[in-house]
Image: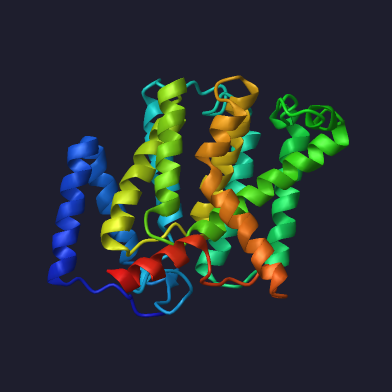
Amino acid sequence: MDKNLFVLTGKDLLKLSAMMLLGTILFGLTGLVIMIILQWFTRQSYAQDSVDKHGISQIGASRLGGFAVMLCAAGLLGAGTYTGLIDAELGPLGVDYFVWITVSCCMGLGLVEDLKNDYLAPRVRLYSEFAIFGVMVAVTPQFIPLTLGIWGLDAVMALPVIGFVLTVMFCVGFINAVNMADGANGLIPGILTISFSLFYAETGSLVHAALMTSCGLFTIFNVISGRLFLGDTGSYGLGAILVLSGLYFYERGVFSASFLAVLLAYPCIDFLMTLARRSWQGRSIFLPDNDHLHNRLYFHFQKRF
């Protein structure tokens, strides 16, 4: 087993104290407890990211941040269910529990990769994602957006087979977009925190309140310490929740398509640009690189400052 990459120094202790103080101020005792849990995950010797791996971070870190976020959110939801704040008859989103089985499958797929890097070939992960979302959309077709307000597209989406295929492709593409864009501390966690905060503010959904709390605290930890990443567990699992929440709320008229498009624009734009760049250069679209938008901005400002 690899030696733990994180050795506490005086500077690290100051950062930890600042994170715990900030978490307590913003989220009370819950924030303090979750900060301690996140710190515990950084001390584990498994699922560690190497220093020289692609991305902006230049220090060793754990890839179990996404698992920690989901674990903390589940704990908050469990407490809510125990106290009667959450209806136990339906899933936390007010939909069938099968949606959460889908999220769990995406998390499991990412967790395998976090624990043993490159254990599953990229194509195997991709085919698995199509299978997971294919079954989910087939069982819960209400997630297929039928009225996007775009001339011609509504008629196409109304065709059962085409609407099914496009919805599955969008879901798979989105979670991979989140995975690709997760290369700078605070970037994707910040988007997740803002998104879940808006979902909670508009709907009062306690599941999104739990996710907002967990992601918000993780963002603080991720930015200040840089010792804990979302990993594939987080990008796949939280990405699945984000895309399914967007489809769910759009179909119920809570948010418009244009609002959601702006809110979730960055990972989608970066994803499309990355695929186009790699294809143009004759490279495999599955191989990672350091040429994303956040990498370009980092290298540009690093030279100037």
Residue 63 in the image: state x and y as whole percent: 44, 64
Depth check, front residue: 91 or 168: 168
Q: Quadrant of the N terminus?
A: bottom left
* Quadrant of res 12: bottom left
**Which of the pair 157/221 is nearer the observer?**
157
Q: Position of residue 49 (x, y in %)?
A: 43, 72
| Quadrant (top left, top right, bottom left, bottom right) of the C terminus | bottom left
**Relative to the observer, which residue lies in front, 166 or 31?**
166
Residue at (50, 61) in percent of width and height: 293
> Image check: 137 left or right of 70?
right
Q: Is residue 302 above or below residue 52?
A: above
Give the left or right position of residue 128, taking residue 219 as reference. Answer: right
Residue 29, percent from left and from top: 21, 38
- Residue depicted at x 35% and y 74%: 58
Residue 171 seen in this snapshot: yes
Q: How is the image coloured?
A: rainbow
Examine the rendered structure and indicate whether residue 95 appears above or below residue 135: above
Q: Name the residue at 48% across, 73% down.
A: 54
Residue 81 visible: no
Q: Total marks drawn?
A: 0
The one of 89 and 256 positioned closer to us in this rendering: 256
Query: What residue is drawn where x is 63% and y is 36%?
Result: 99
> What is the residue that sits farthest to the front in this orientation?
304
> Can you give x and y, in whole percent of width and height, for residue 74 in the image?
43, 40
